[in-house]
Image (spheres, helix red, strand yellow):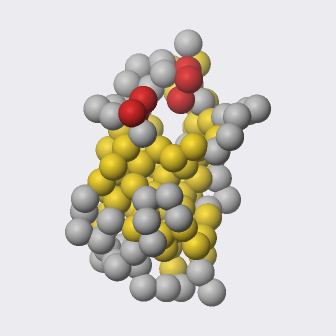
Amino acid sequence: QVQLVESGGGLVQAGGSLRLSCAASGRTFSTYVMGWFRQAPGKEREFVAGINWSGASTYYDSVKGRFTISRDNAKNTVYLQMNSLKPEDTAVYYCAAYGSSWIEYDYWGQGTQVTVSS
């Protein structure tokens, strides 16, 4: 049974940083794409970042240069380091696991709230 445990959300002032973590279990981790999505109130869920098995990554344009996705295959964990946060980054962030492409995933985390105050 696949489990995804997210952590690291919270309240931060604009310009601050947070690091999200997503620990996966129940399925081989290292050979799949992992990603992060977010959903702000009243908006569609949107792709934020993805990382494949070799460490190659891709980002949504608005977070490029501020967010960094990484993975530790030994710990079955994917991270999202978020720097220079802006109020418009406020959303529920979801870990997406065991993907076959940057936008197609088999499992989703429960979501963690990130709130950036101005």
Residue at position x 34%, y 78% in the image: 30
At x 23%, y 69%, the residue is: 54
77 lies left or right of 97: left
Q: Can residue 19 be seen? A: yes
Position in image of residue 24 (x %, y %): 50, 73
Q: Nearer the viewer, residue 86 or 117?
A: 86
Residue 16 visible in the shown view: no
Residue 115: where, in percent of width, then height? 60, 30
Q: Is residue 102 above or below residue 88?
A: below
Residues 42 and 14: in front is 42
Asked whether, in this view, residue 11 is left or right of residue 77, the answer is right
For the point 51% across and 47% down, the residue is 47
Residue 107, x across and y down, in percent: 60, 70
Q: Pinpoint residue 14: horizontal percent, then vertical percent.
A: 48, 18
| 36 up-or-down from 113: above or below | below
The residue positioned 36% from the left and 38% from the top of the image is: 67
Q: Nearer the viewer, residue 47 or 20?
A: 47
Quadrant of the snapshot with the N terminus: bottom right
- Is 109 rendered above or below residue 25? above
Task: Describe residue 71's horizontal placement relative to residue 92 as left or right.
Answer: left
Q: Quadrant of the C terminus?
A: top right
